[in-house]
Amino acid sequence: MLALNDTSTWPTFSFIGIPGLEAAHMWISIPFCLLYLMAVGGNFLLLILVRVEQNLHEPQFYFLAMLALTDLGLSLSTMPSVLAIFWFDVHHISLNACLTQMFFIHTLSSVESGVLVAMAFDRLVAICAPLNYTRILTHCTVACLSGAALIRGTTLLAPLDFPFCGANILSHSYCYYPDMLNLACGDVTFSSVYGLACVLCTFAVDVIFILVSYMKILGTVMKLGIQDRNWKSLQTCVCHLCTVLVFYLPLISLAVLHRYTQETPPILYTTMSNAYLLMTPLLNPLVYSLKSKQIQAALRKRFWVQRVVAGE
């Protein structure tokens, strides 16, 4: 991501926190901190389970580990600026720091979308071609799909090649590309079109692929008799669909607010932005812990072992 304007002309930006509740920021920081700790702890626990449990050494759980790693990155990318506002009343960020944060947020969001596509492909093969599952979803295939998501996320970045002037107040608690566009005083046509093209090449294409995959899965399942249907695989599809909804609904809502609404209350921007980058890392581990029987079995096994060790 490039910043071609002179940083000495506009060195800092300001976060607004939660409009109208500035006096209560210290109290608001308590639930925010707890939610961040739960998100970091939940995703870290998923990584440990996939690493130590042999029963979880399968392609779908490798993708889940990739998803957890991406969620960890998203949480750690936004946590410093959000908690700095609430705890230390620090509302300013330099341009270079803002660009760095924006790089990680947009890169990891794109990577997460790509991982969700890979997980949809995994479910497609598991249900539509179960006999060829191990032949298609090899370790090499998993590595290639994960690497492709990472490469795409780091290469498709919109350039920031416009000057800033006038107000420098960001409507979120972190640096967000459409928010930066609103502060530009020059011609942002190229940056806006390029950014929209990147969105279409990533999130729009990913959503279409996921929808087509589940249409194919649904068609395959409906052709089978009741006794022949793989209910275990369908259970993992429910987990994946919940994860897709948790990720894309706040993302689409935030994009619509920025592009197609005028005079939106600032608190609505703040609420949707925090839901976008906080609820996704928080809910993904909960969804798989509540819906995936393999994850539940691994958790019970680990806690039982800990209780036995403690009893000794």
Image (tube, rainbow, N blue to C red):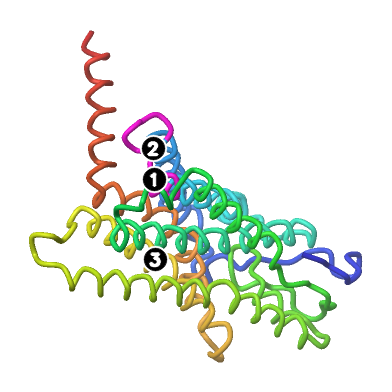
- Across and down, in percent, residue 1 comes to 77, 64
Residue nearest the viewer, comparing 30 with 170: 170
Task: Please state which amino acid type lies under the numbered disc 2.
Answer: His
Residue nearest the viewer, comparing 93 with 27: 93
Residue at mark 1: 61
Kindly indicate the quadrant of the structure image that contains residue 222. Answer: bottom left
- Across and down, in percent, residue 45 comes to 40, 37
Q: Residue at x 75, y 80 (%)?
A: 191
Pointer 2 with pointer 1, Cβ within 8 A: yes
Q: Residue at x 66, y 57 (%)?
A: 151
Measured Cα–Cα span from mark 2 to mark 1? 7 Å
State yes or no: residue 57 in magenta: yes
Task: State the SS at label 1.
Answer: helix
Q: Is residue 195 left or right of residue 33?
A: right
Task: Please state which amino acid type lies under the numbered disc 3.
Answer: Val
- Magenta region, residue range: 51-64
Q: Tell me the quadrant of the picture where the C terminus can be found.
A: top left
- Across and down, in percent, residue 208 comes to 45, 77
